[in-house]
Amino acid sequence: MARAALFVACIALLAACSPVRRLLPQEKLLTGVRLELDGKSTSDDTYWEVVQQLPNRNILGWKAYLALYNLPQRESEKAWARWLHRIGEAPAVLDPVRTAKTLRQLEHVAENDGYLRAQGTVAFTEAKKPQRTAMVYQVKRGTLFRIGTCSFTFYSPALEEANTAHPLHLGSLLQTGAPLRSTTLDAERNRIATALRELGFFSMGPELVRIQIDTLKTPGTAHLEILLEDPYVATPFGPAVTPHRVRTVGQITVYPNYRYTDGSAGGRPVPNPATGIRQVSTDGLHSFNANRLNEWIVPRPKTTFKASSFEQTAQRISSFPAVQSSEWRFSEARGDTINADLLVVRAPAARVFFRSEGTTTSGLYGLGGTVGLGHSNVWGGAERWELRLNGALSAQAVSGDQQALFNTAEWGLETSLHWPRLYGWPQAWKPKNLVAAYTEARLNVNRQQRPEFARQTFGARLLFDWKPNPRAEHSLALVDLAYINLLNADPAYVNSLLFKTGFQNTLIAASTYRLQWSPPTKKSIQKSLNWSLESAGTALEGFRRLTGASWDQVDGSYTVAQVPYAHYLRTELDARYRLLRSGKRQWAFRGLVGLAYTLSNSPTLPPFEKSFFAGGSNDLRAWPAYRLGPGAFPGAVFDTLRYVSTGPAKLLFSAEYRFAISSSLYGAAFVDAGNTWLLPRNLREGTGLLNLPELAPLVVWTPRNFLAQTALGAGFGLRYDFSFFVVRADWGIRLWDPTEPLSDRLVVLPFRLKKTALNLGIGYPF
């Protein structure tokens, strides 16, 4: 009876909520908007983004947000009424003023796109129900004008001479036959101004590059004349023209402790004989070292002005945590010389910081936090020191352990020292003209407590990182040491593992090189590539063989202080491609290839941390992490032995279509394919499950069987953007499951819920 009454009440509520019930008699509700270009409907965002009126949102045809807004009286001031008005949506009432503005904006968009004689009109369609109307914006764009000839006119003789030596038409964005778009014209003006400022013309800016367009000479063609005008300066007798001329840098003065509030700059300037740069002396603890500041300043006195060198200096110095901001100020000097002052505003050196975050790692979900102490200018050269205390609680599914929400804990202490340069790098090998560079030394100790085991890690690292240009970054971890100490391991759990190498005391002494490359975005296409190469145990093995001394062995591996050292080569290539479309839609693709090749002192398998796994929120999302592979490893083992799967070889391909649902909510449809495998050498001295001869054809990669052993999954996802981070939920459905026998691997039909996985994550998967 109660359910029937509730149903009748809902029907009555829906019937009572007429969308026009709160409108004034002269108002009309906008029920639909359509946009036509040259007689055809369009979804082009370039035009739609200037439309100032859109109908109310609906859910399956019902304007739910408008219904919530209309529940209380229009003028009600009650708290519940204000709340409904806030979460609801006001009626989209037709506004003639906004309609007229939209028409003008649509014509401007068409003109900016090369249609110089576009005309817009609007048509209304009255609905059968009263006080409702729909509109159609109709834009007749007419002829698309294309670029014809292009010539230059120079107001200054110096500019004409510079053009003779460095022709400005080379690299021009104005190509004959291309559409006449305003964005192209603006980009060309900026390109010309930038090129001339690089040649020493300090006073040149894009506002002095004017483009005259002639559309009368040839129908449908725009002939361009680029005018490079002279600047005006104020004089006691009024504005006066000053012809462009090449400028020379005069005095460069650095103010390392500038304050905008009172214009305070410190003491007297002290010149540096080596560079000629003057620096205002500052007193006090941890002030900036003059020599270090001079190293970061690219321009030098008595050289030709070059805009990029000043911009590069300001950007690099502003990137230091010890600096709040930095900027250049220029002043005229005698003749063709300009003086430059670098104003550096310092940030507080000492700081205490706290960070908290939601974590998702390899199928473990939880909370983490960091408390730290730092100093951003230790020796006056913007060196940054930090001491961090890290902690995290995570939840993982473990059979027989259902007592606690969080059953995995991790905590650790870490300290690091960061130099904003290649510290200790041989001078002869230092790359020139770097965009950025730093050196980092780090020590850490960490403990992880899981239901099956506890693990302590002691680490040390020396890292060099440099960027020769904004698109490429090189990183070299010259020394990367890690000692892994296993404690309180559950024997039943360890015996069920294929990769026991990762669950023994291990010393990893490695060096790693990494390249990150991101080519320029072209036509809404973004690409990136990340490649790494790691070598571990090579130096120790070479030293052992050169010395010829007898070293202790444990399980067939040579040791350092009774701890076996890992010996392997590891490489990974991760390529990503994104195609941006209109309406916040995009296609995203990812391909990954990884290989960990064991050498003589690791006869069977690489360490657990250096192997690859499949499944989880950033991988094959139709499987939980560590529950797939290697190869066609039987799924029954996962269910009976709590098996944790990793492999020294991996292939992965993912494709994802992303689209907007609302302003902050996004959806995705995805496909993932891949797996991990063993190599034949990993079975030569296998233990435990590796001793089973029938497993070899199932887990070892071969060209003949890898396609049949490649897992395939698809699914759907939701992402909510909080602006500072993204929360993600992906539901993956298995299509081809290599953990099943070959005849049962196609698992699409019949649908089974146990052949799906819900993975939560922070941020996008790739």
Image: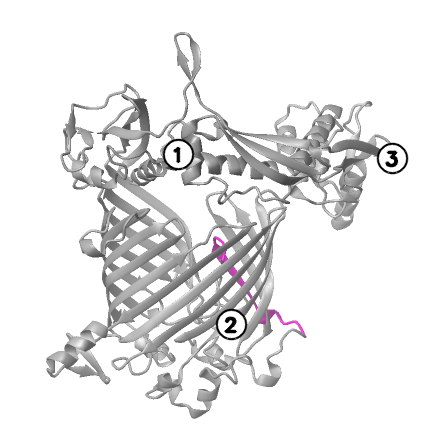
Vertical relation: 625 (above or below) 255: below
Report x, y in % for residue 409.
34, 60
Q: In the image, what residue type sits under mark 2? A: Gly
Q: Taking the image as drawn, is residue 515 in sight?
A: yes
Between disc 2 and disc 1, the foreground one is 1
Task: Name the residue beneath numbered marker 3.
Answer: 129
> Which residue extends farthest top?
237
Q: In the image, what residue type sits under mark 3? A: Lys
Count how many numbered circles sit on residues in the image.
Answer: 3
Residue 124 as seen in the image, left or right of residue 43: right
Q: In the image, what residue type sits under mark 1? A: Arg
Distance between the alpha carbons at the discs numbered 3 and 1: 64 Å
Specify the quadrant of the image occupied by residue 449: bottom left
Task: Name the residue beneath numbered marker 2.
Answer: 674
The answer to whether residue 428 is magenta is no
- In terms of sequence position, does the residue under pointer 3 or pointer 2 come before the other? 3
Residue 131 as seen in the image, left or right of residue 426: right
